[in-house]
Amino acid sequence: MITVTKGSNKLELPVYKNIATLNGKNTALNGVVVYNGVDYFVPQQAVDLIQ
């Protein structure tokens, strides 16, 4: 699980899933969150949610 906080917003991204939770509200993503052992890769849609 990746947790990103910006101001009062909290975005949670479970690894290998296509769901993001922003402030308790689930949103379906166009792609999945991937972790290769070193780096995390998230869909652009997830980045746009927290900005």
Image (cartoon, rainbow, N blue to C red):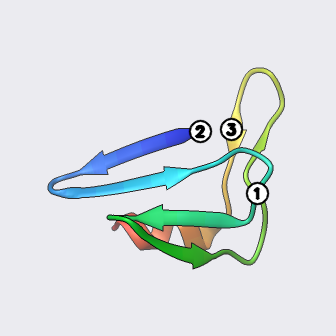
Q: Distance between the residues labelled 3 and 1?
A: 12 Å
Mark before the other along the chain sequence, 3 or 1: 1
Badge 2 crowding class, 10 Å Cα cut-off, few under 14, some 14 to 19, many 20 or more, is few
Is there CB contact under 8 Å for labels 3 and 1?
A: no
Mark sitting on residue 40:
3
> Horizontal and vertical percent for residue 5?
30, 47
Task: Report helix, strand or loop for mark 3.
Answer: strand
Task: Report helix, strand or loop for mark 2.
Answer: loop
Residue type (three-letter) at the residue carrying disc 1: Lys
Nearer the camera: disc 3 or disc 1: 1
Residue type (three-letter) at the residue carrying disc 3: Tyr
Badge 1 crowding class, 10 Å Cα cut-off, few under 14, some 14 to 19, many 20 or more, is some
The residue positioned 76% from the left and 57% from the top of the image is 17
Residue ID for mark 1: 17
The residue positioned 33% from the left and 68% from the top of the image is 51
Mark before the other along the chain sequence, 1 or 2: 2
Residue ID for mark 2: 1
Please indicate whether residue 5 sits to the left or right of residue 49 in the image.
left
Q: Distance between the residues labelled 1 and 2?
A: 10 Å
